[in-house]
Structures are given as structure tokens and as C-alpha cells.
Image (spheres, rainbow, N blue to C red):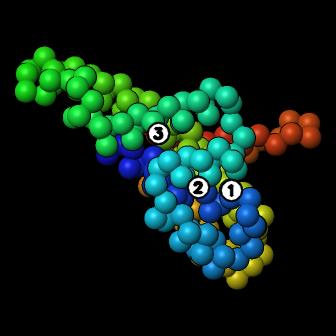
Amino acid sequence: MSLQLLEQGLKHLLPLVDLEGAPDALSNLKQRADKVSLKTLGALGGRFLENVTTSPDLDAELDQLIKERNQLVHHFHSCGLYDLSSIEGCEAAARRLEAQHHKVRRLMQVVDLLLHAAFEAACETTFAGTPEYVEFRALCDEFASSRGVLRHSTSKTGDDVVETWLIRAD
């Protein structure tokens, strides 16, 4: 389930950060969202890594998580690592799934922060002063409330602007 949430988060993020063209209108953004709507987690992860600069550790973690997801979905039972007919085998499989769940949650927090920042940036730059601003502002606010963004603040230090979001931890 958590892997599906990560996949959904990437499907929301990529139309905002994909470098194939600027989301200069809400209709263009919706078209870009349609293009990624049927992509797999592997394809989405690849696009994310192409379009978002992250740390090498995060890149490796996402790549490893995609490999683990594919192994889980396509080969978990047949890999022979777990005897699912025994209590011990089921407990070992449950421990592995729990560990994977924690990795997904860490990545999901990163995706949520990037998604919120991308929504805010597009709202206040691309859509500012356009007829689509009100609709896009509503999308930003809906996202923030659905993801547990409790507070957003902006501060300026010299020439640098610092954006801060407080995200509810589950």
C-alpha cells in the first residue's frame, strides 16, 4: 500500500517538475499529468531522477526500493527466501515488509516536501496573475491539507529566501 502512495506522489510531482516544458497553463499541466497517469513506479522513478537533483544516497535508495518493489510484486513467493507455510517464515517475511515500509515512508516524506514546494512555486510564479490562479491555488491548498501540511512560512536572510513547511508525522 505504501508503495502505491509513493507512486501516486510521483505522479503528482512529475507534471510540475518535468523538464519537457513549462506548465504555462493549467490545461498543459493536466495533459502532463495524463501522460504519467499510467506509468509504473519504475518509469516514474526514472523520470524523477532525470528531473530532480537529489543526493546520491537518495538516488540509490529510490533505485533500490524500485528493485525491491519489483521483487516483491513479481517474485516474492517464488524466490524461496520465505517458507510461507510456517509461522517463522511468515514472521521473517513480515519483518522484511516492515523494513521496506519504513524506507518507503522516508522517501514519501521527501516526495511530499518536493511536491508541496513545486505546487507553491508554480502557484506563485507560473499561475500568478492568470485566470487559472484561483483554481490552481485551490489545488495547492487541497494538497496541503490532504498531506498534513500544518504550516508554511517564508523568511529572508540577506539575498536568500527560506521556505519552511511543517509536515504532520504519522
3 or 2: tag closer to the N-terminus: 2
- Specify whether 30 is left or right of 142: right
Eye-nearest disc, 1 or 3? 3
Mark number displayed over residue 13 = 2
Q: Image quadrant of residue 22?
A: bottom right
Q: Amino acid at mark 3?
A: Ile
Mark number displayed over residue 17 = 1
Task: Provide the secondary structure element on which disc 2 rests.
Answer: helix
Give neighbour class at mark 2: few <14, some 14-19, many 20+ (Cα, 10 Å).
many
- Specify whether 29 is left or right of 94: right
The residue most toward the top is: 88
Residue situated in front as seen by the camera: 163 or 110: 110
Eye-nearest disc, 3 or 2? 3
Q: Which residue is mark 3?
A: 66
Query: Dots 2 and 1: beta carbons under 8 Å?
Result: yes
In the rendering, at what x and y percent does residue 65 appear?
46, 34
